Image: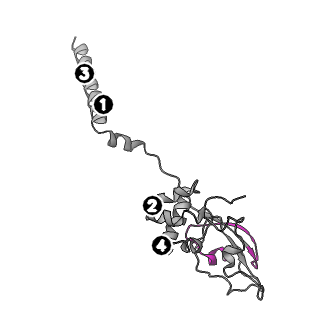
Amino acid sequence: MALDRLKLIGFGILIGLLCSALILVVANPRQARSGIILPTQISTEITVFVTGEVNNPGTYSLPPSSRIQDAIKKAGGWTARADQTALNLASILSDGQGIYVPAIGEDSPQDPSTERFAPVDNGGKININTATIEMLDDLPGIGPSKAEQIVAYRQNNGAFDTIEDILSVPGIGPTIFEQIQDLITVSPTP
């Protein structure tokens, strides 16, 4: 009989604990959900294409915030024919960027790191999924800081599906979007 009484007390305590837990979950749902938040996937690398006068042209993965000089080093360094003054070695790279190292005396665009690999004609619009910081900086209302935020957002969250998705970037609100909406795209036009 004493054993049955102990089982009943234990069962009562167990039911009491379960009811208390249920009350806490119902009374504070925000705290209860915090235990099931999954980590977001953050890109730990960017990929760039390096070609022209480098020893090992190709596609390379680098840490975010890498600079053109890092990509050239990863591609085996300059060849003897490379025009080492044609590129801004301090420019921060973006995922999917192409870097072309011209030869000495070669006619090259003003910024060969971006123009050599310009995407299909977008009707003069800037593709916010592939644009460099320098390209984004040319947009009205977007300075170097916001341009860096756009690239960082793109690296951390993936490509923009629509131009309106740029509103998710901190610091870009409806006023700035209104200024740039006719100047940006997310994919090449046919």
> Could you tell me residue 43's position as x and y percent?
56, 59
Tags 1 and 4 touching, CB below 8 Å: no
Q: Nearer the viewer, mark 3 or mark 1?
A: 1
The colour mode here is: one colour
Tags 3 and 4 touching, CB below 8 Å: no
Q: Nearer the viewer, residue 172 or 20?
A: 172
Give above or below for 120 relative to 84: above
The residue that mark 1 highlights is: 22
Tags 3 and 1 touching, CB below 8 Å: no
> Could you tell me residue 116's position as x and y percent?
72, 74
The residue that mark 2 highlights is: 174
Q: Amino acid at mark 4?
A: Ser
Helix, strand or loop under label 2? helix
Instruction: Write the start and end of the magenta stretch as one range.
Output: 51-72
Q: Residue at x 54, y 74 (%)?
A: 137
Tags 3 and 2 touching, CB below 8 Å: no
The residue that mark 4 highlights is: 145
Query: Which quarter of the rendering shows the N terminus?
Result: top left
Q: Residue at x 48, y 59 (%)?
A: 167
Farthest residue to the top: give it.
1
The residue that mark 3 highlights is: 12
Q: Amino acid at mark 2?
A: Pro
Between disc 2 and disc 1, whose residue precedes? 1
Helix, strand or loop under label 1? helix
Between disc 1 and disc 4, whose residue precedes? 1
Query: Which quarter of the rendering shows the C terminus?
Result: bottom right
Tags 2 and 1 touching, CB below 8 Å: no
